Image (tube, rainbow, N blue to C red):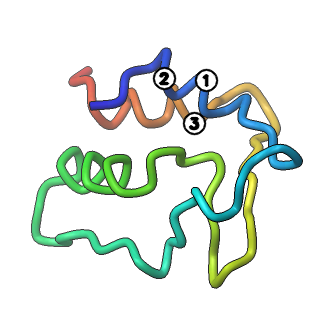
Amino acid sequence: MMNLQMLAQCAHADITTCDPGNLVDLRNVTIDTTLPVSQRLSQLLDQVHNPYLFKVDGVVVKVNFSGGKRLASALAGLLIPQ
């Protein structure tokens, strides 16, 4: 299971040096939508490996966020009961 430190490392992945052959294409990811959000998120992370860097229809995609909130914080908010 991915932790916040691993997510932070994923955020720093460099799109210019990644091997596109090693990236997961989101079209090949399947999520059981009947599961609770935390389990669906776990399925996504297990299959994609890096939620910041992946492919869509063969095109490499790097996700960046503007503003103060980071993906790791948003995901933690879903997984950690408040």
* Residue highlighted by disc 2: 6
Is 18 placed left or right of 29 in the picture?
A: right
Q: State which tag comes first along the sequence, 3 or 2.
A: 2
Q: Amino acid at mark 1?
A: Gln
> Mark 2–mark 1 contact, CB under 8 Å?
yes
Which of these two is toward me, 25 or 44? 25
Question: What's the residue at 63%, 84% (across, down)?
Answer: 57
Which of these two is toward me, 44 or 78? 44
Question: What's the residue at 72%, 35% (across, down)?
Answer: 13
Q: Nearer the viewer, mark 3 or mark 2?
A: 2
* Residue highlighted by disc 1: 9
Is 32 placed left or right of 21 in the picture?
A: left
Picture coordinates of residue 19, whole percent (x, y): 71, 54
> Mark 3–mark 2 contact, CB under 8 Å?
no
Which of these two is toward me, 54 or 65? 54
Q: Amino acid at mark 3?
A: Leu
Is 18 placed left or right of 36 in the picture?
A: right
Is 82 placed left or right of 39 in the picture?
A: right
Q: Amino acid at mark 2?
A: Met
Image quarter of the N terminus = top left
Q: CA distance from mark 1 to mark 3?
A: 12 Å
Question: What's the residue at 61%, 59% (across, down)?
Answer: 54
Q: CA distance from mark 2 to mark 1?
A: 5 Å
In the displayed structure, 56 sits above or below 10; it is below
Q: CA distance from mark 3 to mark 2?
A: 12 Å
Image quarter of the C terminus = top left
Q: Secondary structure at mark 1?
A: helix
